[in-house]
Amino acid sequence: MRQMTETIPYQITGRTGEIESRRYPPLVLATVQDDGDDSGFRLLFAYITGSNRTRSTIPMTAPVITSETIPMTAPVISGSGSGSISFVMPAGRTEDQVPAPLDDRIRIATTPAREIAVIRFAGHAGREAVEADASRLEEGLNRAGIASRGAPLLMRYNHPLTPGFLRRNEVGIEIRR
């Protein structure tokens, strides 16, 4: 199966049981709202394959980041509710160095450098698996006395046609030390 060519860089800052803490640099994201029907993925894929103001292609990177929440519960995945989906622009590019989108539903923005705690899992990122891993992540951080900030994220690293047992997924949340 086709792999995404570049994984966004990070530095491992610690481990607590199955939880890995990472420091990410500022990231330029192309983000759209997604109604759970994969329209957001298709819109972003069109953007990186030339549907932009300069008609340029942008290399695909990993992970694809999904941020979706249901009030008072863990995150859900694309296909089960509304939220956002983001493609990370290649490392080293600034907002000014990526082509402007043709579609005004695509937002280009830079996230600041931050530390994120993650739990990795294989298989399909179904709602129950993501919710269970998000709960384990939050419980592990609470036991370790590490404060989290914001809602959990789902990070998927593989092409959608990759067999489940070969998939790399992660649930992450920003932390403060």
Image (spheres, rainbow, N blue to C red):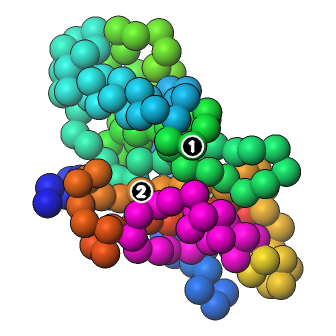
Q: Which quarter shows the N terminus?
A: bottom left
Q: Position of residue 144 (x, y in %)?
A: 80, 84
Q: Are marks 2 and 1 in contact (CB under 8 Å)?
A: no
Q: Position of residue 116 (x, y in %)?
A: 62, 63
At x 78% / y 77%, what residue is drawn? 139
- Which amino acid, by three-letter code, is at mark 2? Arg
Residue 138 numbered mark, or none: none
Residue 80 numbered mark, or none: 1
> Dot 1, how many residues are within 10 Å of its Cα: few (below 14), some (14-19), or many (20+)?
some
Q: Quadrant of residue 112?
A: top right
Nearest to viewer (mark 2 / mark 1): 1
At x 41% / y 56%, what residue is drawn? 156
User: Which residue is under mark 2?
Assistant: 156
- Residue 157, relative to residue 89: is it above or below? below
Q: Secondary structure at mark 2?
A: strand
Q: In the depicted view, which residue is nearer to us: 150 or 83? A: 83
Q: Secondary structure at mark 1?
A: loop
99 left or right of 105?
A: left
| Residue 48 shows up from this direction | yes
6 left or right of 173?
A: left
The residue range painted magenta reads 118-138
| Residue 31 shows up from this direction | no
Residue 9 colored in magenta in the image? no
- Which amino acid, by three-letter code, is at mark 1? Ser
Q: CA distance from mark 2 to mark 1?
A: 16 Å
**Considering only order in the chain, which callout, 1 or 2, is on the residue closer to the N terminus?**
1
Q: In the depicted view, which residue is nearer to us: 45 or 13? A: 45
6 left or right of 23?
A: left
Q: In the depicted view, which residue is nearer to us: 10 or 59? A: 59
